[in-house]
Image: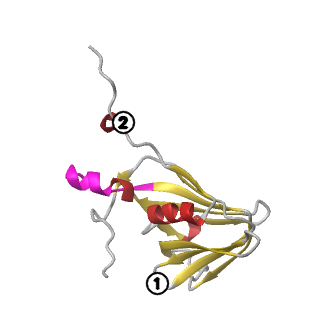
Amino acid sequence: MTRDAKFEDGGEGAIALRAETKEDLAVIAALVQDAILPITEIAWEAKARRLALLINRFRWEDKTAAEAEKRPYERVRALLVLSDVTHVASMGIDRSDRDVVLSILDISFEEKDDGAGRVTLTLAGDGALAADVECLDVDLRDVERPYRAPSGHAPHHPD
């Protein structure tokens, strides 16, 4: 005997999202909040006009299910790619220290009249990465299977 599939029967797949509006970017920003990455996993490809970051993001979309099922929280390696980038700047980051681990707190976009603007990645510890872009074009794509969060805890930010 067969039965119709239910939503609950489906497994979660890897995330693959693109942001082309501020509203789209807010979704990606929520998913990469508290992502961590070594400074060595940032690649600015000037000729390709691309800024790519290989991040270890907390799986916020799985937090409630993990709590309900009493299983460990998860992280997943993902690519965060900004396209149509004309210039990149950083603040509060020692780029010469190859052992630095960064944590993303937020991503925002300041738009100019012509659709160009600046994407800013706000980092823990008063650091930031800023990318001047011709248009908003940000991709987030999980590239590996999720793994147990080493800390065993969900990130927490006191009010």
Q: Nearer the viewer, residue 19 or 66?
A: 19
User: In the rendered picture of this protein, how many numbered marks are placed on residues?
Assistant: 2
What residue is drawn where x is 31% and y is 73%?
156
Q: Nearer the viewer, residue 83 or 54?
A: 83
- Amino acid type of disc 2? Gly
| Mark 1, secondary structure of its residue | loop
Location of the C terminus by quadrant is: bottom left
| Mark 2, secondary structure of its residue | loop
Residue 66 is a magenta residue? yes
In the displayed structure, 10 sits above or below 32; it is above
Give the spatial CA distance, label 2 vs label 1.
Answer: 39 Å
Badge 1: residue crowd in 10 Å (few <14, some 14–19, many ≥20)? few
Q: Which residue is mark 1?
A: 125
In the displayed structure, 92 sits above or below 42; it is below
Residue 137 is a magenta residue? no
The numbered disc on residue 6 is none
Residue 76 x %, y %: 43, 54
- Give the residues in magenta: 63-76
Q: Is residue 18 visible?
A: yes
Q: With 14 as the anchor, is 157 left or right in this view?
A: left
| Front label number (2 vs 1) | 2
Q: Residue furthest top?
A: 1
Location of the N terminus by quadrant is: top left
What residue is drawn where x is 50% and y is 77%?
123
Mark 2 or mark 1: name the one nearer the start of the chain: 2
* Image quarter of residue 46: bottom right
* Image quarter of residue 153: bottom left
Q: Which residue is mark 2?
A: 10
Answer whether labels 2 and 1 touch (C-beta < 8 Å).
no
Q: Residue furthest front?
A: 113
- Amino acid type of disc 1? Gly
Residue 158 x %, y %: 30, 80
